[in-house]
Amino acid sequence: MVGANRAEILRQCRKQGILITRSFFDNLAGFEDPMAILRGAQEFNISGVLDQNHLQLLAKLVPNNNSLTAVNATIEPTEIAPATIVSKAELQMPDITEKVTFSQPTLNAQEVEINHSPVKINASLNVEPNPARKEIRARTIAPMVKPEPLAPHILKGLQNYDIGDFPMIASDVDIDLEIHFDITGNSVTEGKMNDINSCFSSRLDKIRKMIVAGGEMPSRVTNINQLLADRHAFTGRENIACAIGLVNEPRNTKKGHLIFELEDNTGATTCLLRKDDDDPNPIISHGLMPDDVIGVAGTFSNTGDLFYVNDLFFPPLKRRKRKNSPDAQVSVAFLSDIHVGSKTFLEAQWQKMVQWFHTDPLAKTIKYFVLSGDCVDGVGIYPGQDKELSIPDLFNQYDEFAGLLHQLPDWVECIMLPGNHDAVRPAEPQPALEPDIQQSFNATHFVGNPCDFSLHGVRILSYHGKSIDDYVSGMRNVTYSNPVQAMREMMQRRHLAPQWGGKTPLSPEPEDNLVINTVPDIFVTGHVHGHACVDYKGTTLVCSSTWQDQTSYQRMLGFQPKPCILTVVNLGTHMTANIPFA
Ligand SMILES: [Fe+2]
C-alpha cells in the first residue's frame, strides 16, 4: 500500500470514528494516497460504516488522488446505501436522526451536489414522499448544525438501580485499578514433572491452611503416612482421625457410596463416604472434582485398608459483607464471548448497545467494562470453523473488535482478558494478548486469565470459565443451563479449575495461581454463553452474557444461549442491572 500501512489506516479510521468494510480497505490500497481518501471522508462529513460505494464516491470527491488500480469510479443509481449512513449517524449522535437527510427517505432520484461534483443518488425506499423535504439539497451525509437533542430513552425494569445513587458521572472519576494477580510476564514453568509436583504441593498447602484455619475439623490433622502407620488406633466410633489431601478418582459404588483416594505429600489412602438414605449427604449425589483438596474426619476399617469418612470439609465460606467504594460511586459493566469474526456475531444488537451507551443516563455511570474472554472467534479453534467465519483472518478479527470498542463513549475503560478462542496459549493461567494485537485498541487494559483486581477497592475476580466444562462433566448438580452453580462450586473449594487432564489445559506453575486466595466481592465468568447475576454469601456472581447467536453446534446440542444482556454493577451500592439488547 502506497503512502500508508495497514495500522496507520486503521488508526486514522478510529480517529475519525468511521468503520470500513473489507472491500473498502482492499481497494483503498489502489490509491496514490489512501490517507487523503480517509481525510476526504472527514472533510465531506461522511461517517458510519463505509463500503465500496463510499470509496467510489470519495474517489470522485478527493482531487489529485488517482487510483492505481481499476477501481470502478462510476456511481450507479441505488449504489449508496443510505441506511448504513443513517445507522452510524444515529450511533454517534443519536439526537440528530430527525435531521439526517437520509433518515427522511424522500430523495427519489434526487439530484444532490457535493463540492460541485454532481452525484446522482437514488434512495429508492418504500416510503411516502414528504413534500416538505423536497427542496433538501446537499448535506445528505450529515447535518451542518447540531440539532436539539431528543429526550434520552430510560430503560424500564431497573427498580434496584437508582440513578440517584450516583452523585458523579464516570467521566469525572479517575481510574482506580489495582491488579493483585496477573500471570502476564510472570509464568515461570518449564512444564516438567517438578513443576507439576510443585503446583499440586502449592495447592495442597494453600487450601489446607484455609481448612485448618476454619477450625471445624474435630481433631488434629495428621499426615496420611502417619495415619496409616497408626491406623489400628483409629478404629471404632470414638477414635476419630483427620487428614487433608487431594482427591483422586472420585466415583460412586454400585450401592451409591462415594469412594475416592486421598493423597498428600506423604501417602494415600482409600476413603469411603457411605450413603445414608435417612440423612442424605449432597456431596454423595453431586460428586467431587478430581484433584479437589478436602479434609476428612473418620475411622479406619478393622482391616485398616479403608477409611470411613464421617465428615468432609472444604474451606469455610461464611457470608461476608461486600466492600464498596464510597469515594467513587460508578458502575462496572460485564460481557464476555463477543466472538467477533463469527457469522453469528450479533452486530445490529451491538450497535443498539452502543447507541444506549451514548444516550442513557445509566450508561454515564459506567466507568469500567470488563470483557472476560473470547472477544473474537479466533481461527482453527475447532474443526470446520472456517465455514462459520465472516472474518477469516485473526488479526482482522481483533481490528474489527477494536473498532467496535472504539464506538463506545470515551469515558469507558475496558479491561480485557483472553479466553480459549483468543490468540494466546490455551493453558491457564493465560497471559494477556500480545502487544501487536493490543496496538489496535484504545483505552483498553489487557490482563491475563484469570485476573484478580480491584476497582476503587472493590475486589473482582474475572475468569473466562473454561473449567465449567469440567464441572459439568464431573458434578451432577452443574449443567450448562445453570452455569452459575459451577461458580458456587469454585468458590466452595476455592479453586477455579481443579481437574488436571480434563477439558481445561493447565499450566503447572510452581505456585498454583488458580487457588482463590481471597474471596472476591464480584466473581465473573463467561464461556458458556448463558447469563446469571446472583448473590452467593455476599459475593456477586456474574455469568456474563455473550454477543453470539446460537451456533450450529449449539443447535445440534439443543443449547439455547442467552445473548446480548449487559450486566451492570454499582460499585458503591452493589446493586445490579441486567440490560437486554436482543
Ligand atoms: Fe470460551
Image: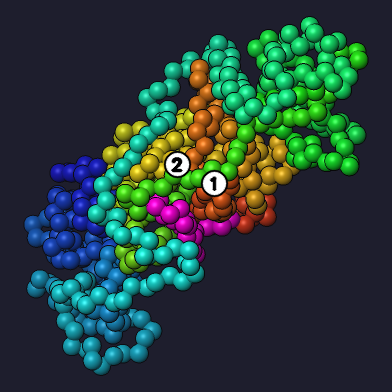
| Mark 2 CB lies closer than 8 A to ligand 1 | no
Query: Residue 453 versus residue 413: which sits nearer the camera?
Result: 453
Dot 2 crowding, Cα within 10 Å, few <14, some 14–19, many 20+ = many
Residue 361 in the image: above or below residue 525: below
x and y, in percent, of residue 118 in the image? 14, 75
Q: Give SS at disc 1.
A: loop
Residue that appears at 41% across and 43% down? 458
Q: Position of residue 524 (x, y in %)?
A: 50, 45
Q: How many marks?
A: 2
Give the residues drawn in magenta, as a range: 561-582
Residue occupied by mark 1: 538
Q: Look at the numbered disc 2 and give the secondary structure of its residue.
A: strand
Q: Residues within 10 Å of mark 1 (few under 14, many from 20)?
A: some
Residue behind mark 2: 460
64 is within the stretch colored magenta: no
Is residue 183 or residue 550 the one in the foreground? 183
Instruction: Name the amino acid, label 2.
Output: Ile
Which labelled disc corresponds to residue 495?
A: none
Left or right of 48 in this view: 191: right
Q: Position of residue 119 (x, y in %)?
A: 18, 74
Image-based side of 427 in relation to 30, left or right = right
Q: Measured from the top left, where is residue 515 in percent x and y? A: 54, 29
Is 564 within the magenta?
A: yes
Q: Residue at x 29, y 45 (%)?
A: 175
